[in-house]
Amino acid sequence: MNRLYKQAVWLIAIALAATMAFADVPMKPWGTPDLQGTWDFRSITPFQRPENFKDQEYVTAEERAEFEKRVLEGRAARAENKEFTQGQGDVDVGYNAFFLDMGTKMTGTMRTSLLIDPPDGRLPPMKEAARERMAGIIKLQERSPVGPEDRNFTDRCILGFNAGPPMTPGAYNNIMEIVQTEDHVAILVEMVNDHRIIPTHGGEALPAHMRLWKGDSRGVWEDDTFVVTTTNFNRFTNFRGTTPDMVLTERFTRTGPDTLLYQYTVDDPNAYEATWTTELEMQRTDDLVYEYACHEGNYAMPLMLKGARKLEAQGRKDENWLPSWHKR
């Protein structure tokens, strides 16, 4: 009961702070909130609600501090572990902790998970056909690559693993820049420098046969929220098991001088039994968006293919080509 009381008090404080902050939201001359700027979407808030927060939607300040402390202590322990004989360990996919930039804080919403709907903070059941599709993709990624087409789109520098749409906190390059005019909103994500130029007055989506890597995005203002609907994904679409028929709805709401609330809803009846929604508070940053020249040289690709050919010449098979974090 004491914990519930403290949580209620904390939620009231959050609501009051949000109300005061929204009064300071900067506006554009044409009357819409100013989304322009560079935004940091790092977060260590779990995507799905952990078991220890099973029936809890929000954390208190004390619980948040304790959670962040445990995460940092876990990272430090892994960084000191020099025994990598039991799996890929700290050198998984060629990186060690030095190259990772996942942030140190939970999202400012104080939620126990990024997933806010369904209310239990857990993904709805996946359709059987979608599970089979995912199993085929995983099987392909596990084996030695026959050619570059066998590798995922991140390895091939086609898409960024956190660039979206939708944008999701990842291992690094969790930063995006918005440039805004009355007629368009342009979003540039540092990862692979992916960009979208989104009209602000909606319009008809592309014909069904026209399919794009990042889909076809159309935006409209609903009160003080910029709502973007994206359809027409191509046949390679696979965001947490989604299909090309996914309808993605993103919502951008400026909630204060230095905060931008980002929500997205996935609607894909071919993949999930129900729609699901996440929420993340982005923070304004003075950091610059740097060039991400993944495609220049991409030395990893020829090295992977050379390694695969060497295994073939030795008559060996290796089913350990899938990064361990894909199996979680």
Image: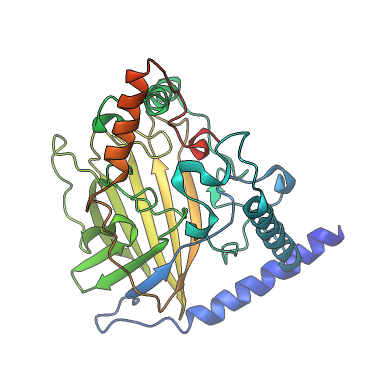
Going by the picture, which residue comes out furthest to the top? 315
Q: Position of residue 136 (x, y in %)?
A: 38, 22
Q: Is residue 118 above or below residue 26?
A: above
Instruction: Tell me which corner region of the image, top left, top right, bottom left or bottom right, holds residue 307.
Output: top left
Q: In which quarter of the image is the C terminus?
A: top right
Total numbered labels placed on residues in the image = 0
The image's colouring method is rainbow
Going by the picture, which residue comes out furthest to the right? 2
Judge whether residue 5 can be spotted in this image: yes
Front residue of 169/261: it is: 169
Judge whether residue 151 can be spotted in this image: no
Q: Is residue 223 above or below residue 244?
A: below
Q: Where is residue 15 in the image (x, y as percent from the top left)?
A: 61, 71
Instruction: Tell me which corner region of the image, top left, top right, bottom left or bottom right, holds residue 85.
Output: top right
Q: In this view, does 112 lie above or below 210?
A: below
Q: In this view, does 244 lie to the left or right of 276?
A: left
Going by the picture, which residue comes out furthest to the front? 314
Q: Is residue 29 above or below residue 306?
A: below
Q: Where is residue 161 in the image (x, y as percent from the top left)?
A: 38, 48
Front residue of 48/274: it is: 48
Q: Which residue is drawn at 22% across and 64% down?
A: 200
Q: Which residue is drawn at 58% across and 40% down?
A: 122
Q: In this view, does 50 lie to the left or right of 189?
A: right
Q: Position of residue 112 (x, y in %)?
A: 64, 54
Front residue of 123/27: it is: 123
Instruction: Tell me which corner region of the image, top left, top right, bottom left or bottom right, holds residue 127.
Output: top left
Q: Quadrant of the N terminus?
A: bottom right
